[in-house]
Amino acid sequence: MLKINRRFEAFLDQIDEITILVPKELVKENKAFYLEKGNGNQPLTIKQKMNIGTHMKYVCQLKSRIQFGQTFLIVDEDGNKTDLQIGSIIRSNEFDQQFAYTGNDLGAVYCQNQTTWKVWAPTATSVKVRLYRQNKSEFSTHEMIRCDKGTWSCCLEGDFEGYYYTYLACINLVWREAVDPYAIAVSINGKFGVVVNKDKIAVPPVKLPLLENKTDAIIYEAHVRDFSIHAESGMVHKGKYNAWLEQDTKNNVGDSTGIAYLAELGVTHVELLPVNDFEEVDEHNPFTSYNWGYNPLHFFAPEGSYSLDPTDPYKRIIELKSLVQSLHHQSLRVIIDVVFNHVYTIKNSSFEKLLPGYYFRHDANGIASNGTGVGNDLASERFMVRKFIIDCASYWMNEFDIDGFRFDLMGILDVETLKELQSKIYSIKPDAILLGEGWDLNTPLPIEKKAIIPNAGKLPTISFFNDHFRDGIKGSTFSLHDCGFISANMEKYEQMKELISGSPNLFSEPHQSINYVESHDNHTMWDRLVSFSPNEIDEKRKARHRLATSIVILSQGVPFIHAGQEFYRTKNGVENSYNAPDEINWIDWSLRSIHKDNVKYVQGLIQLRKLHGAFRLPSAELIKKHLSFNTEHPQLLTYQLQNVEPFGPWESIYVVHHNHFDRSFILSLPEGEWKLVVDPENILLDQPKGINNKVKIGNLGTYVFCKN
């Protein structure tokens, strides 16, 4: 390898511009630089000279473009030499256009008699694929051939199933070893990619009927390990994918748990926290640490700590595919949480090893941006980052038969990437659900290009977590002392009308509003209520909690429930439990029986939402036509769904949300014969209770009346 004593440094920052940094002690009045070529040195024109502290910065003009994939030398007037390093040119539009690769063959493509490896590394001067036997003691290294658009390829004859592999890339005279970003299978703890035979990872799919409208969805968010790890889960394979395959499981008192419980509850979609391979849980000893999974390591390969045998690259894939189909057998669809906004660390990322500086956003000074809060933001607007995201999502959709994606910190991503992604996903599965966190984060992307709630109109088929809904009902997530509607704050009255109506002030259509009061992030609602009012008795706290969940399920939009919310899930006051022990994060299945009455109540609300389409109208136009608020009692939040017989068994529905303790009201219902189907303690769908037109609204909670 060429060895250079870098007394100064040179960087290709524009297609025709080189930046040279020279220590002050080497600076001369007649400083000159040349591009070394075989037919003589080519002088560089110094355009600009700047004093930047310990160095002098020279910006020099190139007379002709250089060829990527080669090493060039810069020489000064004294004969000192340095290599021309690839600098910020990689973040230019010209670079993106020159190296935009559209092929679908990146990664390792296995056949019994040959395997082909292909990787994108346009600035590398040499790339090799290194193959390891499974014991990793023997390896061989093979040169890759430079192909079009900065790709490198190697095809070897023979059967390489089960071989571990990495890539070695020489960039700026430095060799780095990287795991294939497109690896669909990895070794334990993700140290190597693994060549696998895709025929051996097939799991027969269960075909589900088309989801007619997105507002028909009821999403239930769960963590793979939390779901089964508790002693009373009744599941054998605690903390593992296979727990989700176990049928008819029960807790210690004989009540249903696991997937049987989910089917009974009536939700339509299970949203899993990240299941791709992530950092900070040792797969050799998975129960010695805990993590939610928002530390992505390998995007295409499943996490190994949930597998019964993380040393077997096939097993985790088959187990996760089987989990999906197990839920499909229960008519439950699967959404997976994906983290396309950052990586665990830039330094150890395969992205950075194969093309330093390209995959991440930088500010005007070349400093990596940190809108995510973890030290890096993926630059989704760049062609090959966008391609990676779309390729990865398509792979999960095609190979794992999942039914949608939840995008973590979606506001980091750009609108154009989400547009292309939604188009691709809907071509594979038209009724897929795409949702994400549309928070406006401090990343160097123009605001009009961010996938944030104010730009929801540019992404009309993507749904957004509605933080206005969350905070309006229970109080601001970022202030424990802020009082929400369920704590008798009538200043939220006008806002609540908007929220119940599908938030038309925020979104063009109701399916864009993900209505929630609790998720894996921040306090559970129970813990927030305890912190907000520690001296309140549990019965009052339960009533507020139940009211909040009722509003979530009966409002226009898409309801979202955090696993265990229906039985007052607690994390013992821990707000950010991303790496807290199982004892904090687990779903305590004993609470499912202790609070069986509330489980039954939530189950009934879900049944009601499914029974009558008036609670899940698919368009803003229909909501405007059929939903109206009654202001006769300003201390009650009341509304009517009128002329809704085309959507369900009743002509009219009257809903009351009462948020005051120790205050009663007499409500006059419109003319007609009304029946009570919901009160704060009971769901009466099977035996509606006939009532007079004047009804007493006493206990805090939700009331629903229907008229045929």
Image: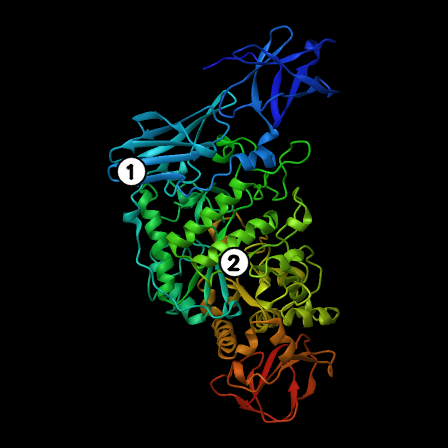
Task: Provide residue 283's location: percent of width, then percent of height.
Answer: 39, 41
Q: From the viewer's perspective, is residue 679 above or below residue 193?
A: below
Instruction: Name the residue: 39% across, 49% down.
Output: 306
Q: From the viewer's perspective, is residue 572 above or below residue 64?
A: below
- On screen, residue 323 versus residue 552, left or right, reads left
Q: From the viewer's perspective, is residue 205 above or below residue 191?
A: below
* Residue identifier under label 2: 434
Task: Provide residue 186's location: percent of width, then percent of height.
Answer: 37, 40
**Quarter occupied by the N terminus:** top left
Camera-nearest residue between 383 and 478: 383
Among the two numbered marks 2 and 1 on one chain, the one whose residue lies closer to the N terminus: 1
Task: Provide residue 279's location: percent of width, then percent of height.
Answer: 47, 41
> Which mark lies nearer to you, 2 or 1?
2
Residue 656 makes an appearance in the image: no
Query: Could you tell me which secondary element the residue under label 1 belongs to?
Result: loop
Residue 162's tag is 1
Res 360 → quadrant: top right
Task: Provide residue 560's location: percent of width, then percent of height.
Answer: 54, 64
